[in-house]
Amino acid sequence: MKLTQAAAATFGLNEESWKRHANAWSVWTRMAGVLPILAPIYFREDLGWWALAPIAAGVIWMWINPHAFKPVYEPRRWAEKGIYGEKMYAADHSLAAEAHRPAIRWLIALAAAGLGIMVYGLVTIEAWPSVFGLTLIFISQLWQIDRFVAIYEEGLRRTSPDSN
């Protein structure tokens, strides 16, 4: 199973929930939902065991989020097109133009590097690696969405009757 398919299976994404996952509110609240998980980890010495409550709430929200919003049947917004492009890419990597595939792999590597730096910062309770790592992850995610928008729009052009 490919990584993208495994992630979709983890969140229980089927045809209908992908449409809900594509809602722009879902995209942006998922991005914003990372901070309530990470902040209590960083401040765990001050919060003690109370840090677990916001972490648990954040994790539960991340799992519920892709199912919580109205479905998008015709993507119009940037984030919606990006998630539709991600779905296309998850189903078949060959739908992405050759130029997109290495870019997506590099962006995933950038996010992985950011994750490592962020985890180091959280473990050692150092602000700069925590914030820098999180910034790398966010930049990578936004750039990936942009690549997925391009994949979605290219897919539309390929399948439109005018493209013949």
Image: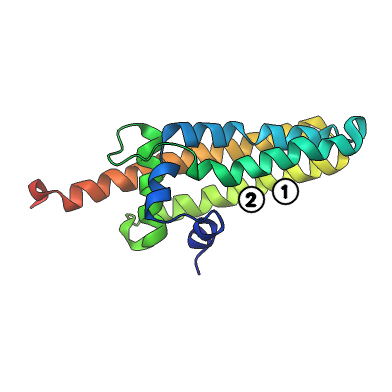
Q: Work out how far the residue at label 1 is from the one at label 2, CA to CA, in angstroms.
A: 6 Å
Up/down of 135 relative to 67, above or below = above
* Mark sitting on residue 31: none
Dot 1: within a 10 Å radius of its alpha carbon, few (fewer than 14), some, or many (20 or more) residues?
A: some
Count of marks overlaid on the render: 2
Residue tagged by mark 1? 116
Up/down of 75 relative to 3, above or below = above
Which residue is located at x 76 percent, y 32 percent?
39
Which residue is located at x 46 percent, y 54 percent?
13
Dot 2: within a 10 Å radius of its alpha carbon, few (fewer than 14), some, or many (20 or more) residues?
A: some
Q: For this rendering, which residue is in front, 65 or 115?
A: 65
* Mark sitting on residue 112: 2
Which residue is located at x 75 percent, y 35 percent?
54
Q: For this rendering, which residue is in front, 96 or 103?
A: 96
Are the residues flagged by discs 1 and 2 in contact, CB closer than 8 Å? yes
Which residue is located at x 71 percent, y 37 percent?
37
On screen, residue 103 versus residue 54, left or right, reads left
The residue under label 2 is which amino acid type? Ala
Residue 145 occupies quadrant: top left
Residue 3 percent location from the top left of the image:
53, 61
Up/down of 131 relative to 109, above or below = above
User: What element does badge 1 sit on?
Assistant: helix
User: What element does badge 2 sit on?
Assistant: helix
The chosen color scheme is rainbow
The residue under label 1 is which amino acid type? Gly
Residue 134 percent location from the top left of the image:
67, 36
Residue 149 percent location from the top left of the image:
36, 41
